[in-house]
Image: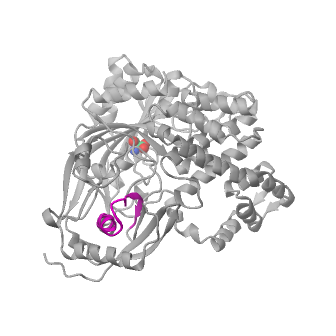
Amino acid sequence: MTASELRKKYLDFFKARNHVIIPSASLLPENDPTTLFTGSGMQPMIPFLLGESHPEGKRIADSQKCFRTQDIEEIGDNRHTTVFEMLGNWSLGDYFKNEHIEWMFTFLTKELKLDPKRLYFTVFRGNPALNIPRDDEAVSKWQELFKTIGVDAKTADFSERDGMKDGRIFFYDEKKNWWSRAGTPDKMPVGEPGGPDSEMFWDFGAELKIHETSPWKNEVCHVNCDCGRFVEIGNNVFMQYRKTANGFETLAQKNIDFGGGLERLASAVDDNPDIFRSDVFKTLRETIESLSGKQYGANANETFAFRIAMDHMRAAVFLIGDGATPSNKDQGYFTRRLIRRALRFADKLGIKEAMATKVANAVIASYGDHYTALQSKKDFILTELEKEEDKFKKTLAQGLREFEKISSGAISGVDAFNLYQSYGFPIEVTEELAKERGLSLDRIAFDLELKKHQELSRTASAGMFKGGLADASVETTRLHTAAHLMLAALRTVLGNHIEQAGSNITAERLRFDFRHGAKMTDEEKKKVEDLVNEAIIKDLPVTIEELSKDEAKAKGATGIFDEKYGAIVKVYKIGSGSNQFSYEICGGPHVTHTGELGGTFKITKEEASSQGVRRIKAIIEKKKISAPR
Ligand code: SER
């Protein structure tokens, strides 16, 4: 079964169970200041899990592109990739555990025809300190389903000494069986939703573990081990709690958040534990094989290099497709690092000629049918990759020579910084070179050096790179509404060609990109500020309309009309009648009256962000505006 067939099977399965299928959101989150990338299928669903009504209803399913920065280090094994597709289905306060578990069991065993005897499950063992009970309900349901096919699914607590003890369903604590964007309950910020989960694993067979060279060959088997024998193919999150200042409260609605890696499920169906051998990588793999004259898998020492090159180039194609062009800051810097690291490994595989566009063509060929934007943006993607490859190729050979010169024992922070500054070597590349030669590298000194020289590193704070969460505060919501007012004001002052080209909003400030050919004059900035502040003083109501995309367009809504949104969209209207100020497609959340912005809107910066794109930073100064309420 190809990944495309599997994706279709899954979406059809949930469509038949009254789910509305929505398109994948962008890898670059809109209006979500908490993270740089969409790292899970549920991320774009957060407002709806917390209770906002979803324009498509209470049953939603999709296949969502995800990018996990924290997995970059893990790439190289048989099952991790930085970009992956996550199949997802959600119940937003509709069906719950019993229905969902039954569907999952049916999907895995009947639709995908996976042998139930090779499926294993985990559930939350409960924690009295959190006042959250053991998930006996999930256990009973899995057991009941196994019974229908004549399997006695025993439960067990995994033990280091006795291993899996014939169990099929295992209890684990919150380190393994709890899901929130922030991780375990203690790491969750107040306001964040989360819940216990039940994970599903496929057993690829013990040979993977007992292999002579496996570092795990003497370890006791368990489903959460990293040896590669068991692979997690799906996670059923019972999203029903929200973190409070002193523990957890139940959400107003009980939600289901299921996520399963498409490529991993396809690997299980094929019974092939190496994700890089799956059909989505086929053309890409063959392209690298033909460029290098080497066979993937023929030489264990080269497998790692093949996997990095495949994973990182595929990810770069998707990231550029969603607008993260290679650069020195924010999301673009991830793209740059991925491309450069891939090129270094391609170089190691003996590929000396330009390869980026050939590899990208292979990726687009494999995905273009489903992700049609990759086709329509093909020229743009190829050009960006080519430019980046050119740039790095010019310095790669020189940098490698420089590395050889300095590599006499230890690489100092200044050396590593020099390689970064003069030859464009991302620190991972230098670290890997050092490791390959058994040299130490002073990473702390490098970081200090970088801090000294690089103002920019401050814009994307360390917290954000780690996927750390800002608060879901009222301040952020206020600035989000301010961004709508500002877009409307910009259109009045600069013209109707102004559209949002990206935004990022934190509790402190809003940042907003738009395409415009010229720097704004002081007068223009002042006019925009005045218009926004007038709207704040008028205390205009903020209301929501749910319309079809075509209706919204016909009624003149601003916003992005691309594949990101489903057929029905939410439009936020600020003001009404002759006082209508803004009318914009958006997922929310917003304040209910502009007076709640509670201060004076002020543009603190207006600068070029990239060719033809301007960037505004703005704040709300907390001077009380007397709003007539
Ligand atoms: N949110 C869960 C995950 O990302 C399931 O969708 O694993």
Residue appearing at x 19%, y 82% in the figure: 626
| Res. 495 image quadrant | bottom left
**Residue at position x 37%, y 58% from top?**
499
Q: Return the x and y of residue 53 as percentages of the image width and height.
A: 22, 49
Q: Is residue 199 above or below residue 190?
A: above
Q: Per the image, is 567 magenta?
A: no
Left or right: 207 in relation to 606: right
The x, y position of residue 282, in whole percent, is 60, 28
Q: Quadrant of ligand 1?
A: top left
| Chosen colour scheme | one colour
**Residue 345 picture location, percent across and down:** 71, 43
Task: Tell me the magenta residue range.
Answer: 483-506
Is 498 one of the magenta-colored residues?
yes
Residue 420 seen in the current view: yes
Q: Residue at x 35, y 30 (%)?
A: 11
Please indicate whether residue 540 sits to the left or right of residue 16 in the image: left
547 to the left or right of 428: left
Above or below for 103 versus 171: above
Tell which of 2 and 237 is nearer to you. 2
Residue 152 location, quadrant:
top left
The answer to whether 378 is drawn above or below residue 483 in the figure is: above
412 shown above or below 233: below
Q: Quadrant of residue 538?
A: bottom left
Q: Is residue 177 visible?
A: no
Marks counted in the figure total 0
Q: Quadrant of the C terminus?
A: bottom left
The residue furthest top is 150
